[in-house]
Image: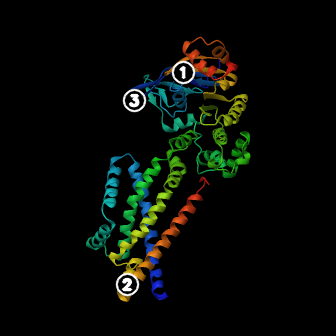
Amino acid sequence: MTLPAISVRSLVKRFGTTTVLQEIDLDVPEGKVSCLIGPSGSGKSTLLRCLAFLEEASEGMITVNGEALGFFENAKGERERLPAGQIRAVRAQIGMVFQQFNLWPHMTALGNVSEALKTVHKVPKAEAEERAMVQLAKVGLANRAGHYPSQLSGGQQQRVAIARALALSPKIMLFDEPTSALDPELTGEVLNVMRELAAEGMTMVVVSHEIGFAATVGHQISFLDQGRLLFTGPPSEIFAKPRHLRLEQFLDTYLDRGASMLA
Amino acid sequence: MSFKLFSLLVQASVWTIGISAISIGLGFLIALGLSAALLSGKALYRRPAEFFISFFRGVPLLVQLLLIYNLLPFIGLNVPSIVAAIVGMSLCTAAYQAENLRGGFESVPKGLIEAADMVGFSPRQVFLRIKVPIALRLTFPALVNEAIMILKSSSLVSVVGIVEITRMAQDLASSTYMPIEIFSSAALIYLVICWAVALAGRYGERSLPGAAK
């Protein structure tokens, strides 16, 4: 068995006295699409943010391709925080796409995609922009390179954000509700880019309400409810014969909305 | 009113504009430091900055100018009154600008910083490449507003003997006995300057990179 791309062990996340994630164990297989689904407030976005180390887990360990993310267990078995440089190095394997795109408004699409290459990796400007153009072309926006975020539609902004993450050649891509801020008409173009990425064998973790996407593209579906990971399995198992009562109720709300393909 | 009198007022406006521009610029630099202190989270830096701001926002500029004008020679600094005027105006506007900047830095959306963290920016790079440009964009209209306030407040430096527009107008009014014409002209000149600054500000705001057109 190959090493999982991300491995989560006994992860607990508390905000103050509220426990939002309880004893999460999850393996994200390499080269596959893992989807986190569940009702609002179930903790799926928080879990994803822990995988990006944007939230620090209160307990438990996360390893990325075998390397500890943020915390490690020292010789005495205690949980110890890694230095900032180490965290940055492990995080460099991860690309993140946010619900609100989070493009930098003072830079063009090309600037957004090439900025980290120039600033962080000291790639010469011409080369950085050339590499950025390749990524923009990949998401179908080469002709929008000189546009500022304010001049792009939501779907275009999200595609630029995907290109920005891809420009650094991450091994794993995390998507935090990438289409939730988009009009239904614009979700398609973003999902298409994600489908292409999946087809190329990118390791992806996707938090989404797009159950259709999860069912058709996902290789592994995890269902969270009230901070607990209730179920992890292939889509065929989850969608064809949901056995868990809570999962069944959750999926029913989608069937009510006409997602007959899942029935 | 003769052209000669009007042109004297226009000449005096060089002082108004010069003192205001230098004060805004120096004040901005001081304000950057103050806002950094306010946001540092360390009481050692924050408390003095807070005290500075309370003082300069809480005492009338006229009193500040008179105080500084008299205080500098008292502590052995015999500087020209123009320096006292610029010091007073700079410190005062710095206090206001610092609060603007603090608000601007605090309003930089957290997600934009997270995006920078995710692509490997160091805290310093996040500050220089993301926080500063965005905070400046957010506070730019307030900065233009402050520039206009300072232009008008510069009339107060007449009390320390600088012959800018207001002082010139007072001198001319008392020597010509034409106060209405002269003060109307002075008002007109202030109005034109402030209008030009507002216009330039609006143009500048529109031409900031990525501004919504």
The x, y position of residue A162, in whole percent, is 65, 38
Q: Which of the marked residues, 1 or 3, is nearer the chain's N terminus?
A: 3
Q: Secondary structure at mark 1?
A: strand
* Neighbourhood count class around disc 2 (C-alpha, 10 Å): few under 14, some 14–19, many 20 upward: some
Q: How many marks?
A: 3
The reply to whether callout 1 and callout 2 are in contact (CB within 8 Å) is no
Q: Is residue A122 above or below residue B63?
A: above
Residue B149 appears in the figure: yes
Kind of residue at disc 3: Gly
Q: Quadrant of the C terminus of chain B?
A: bottom right
The x, y position of residue B137, in whole percent, is 53, 54
* A181 or A195: nearer the viewer: A181
Residue drawn at (33%, 66%), measured in percent from left and top?
Answer: B61
Cα separation between marks 3 and 2: 69 Å
* B1 or B52: nearer the viewer: B1
Kind of residue at disc 2: Ala
* Neighbourhood count class around disc 1 (C-alpha, 10 Å): few under 14, some 14–19, many 20 upward: many
Residue A32 appears in the figure: no
| Residue A16's disc number | 3
| Residue B173's disc number | 2
Q: Which residue is mark 1?
A: A224
Residue drawn at (41%, 26%), measured in percent from left and top?
Answer: A18
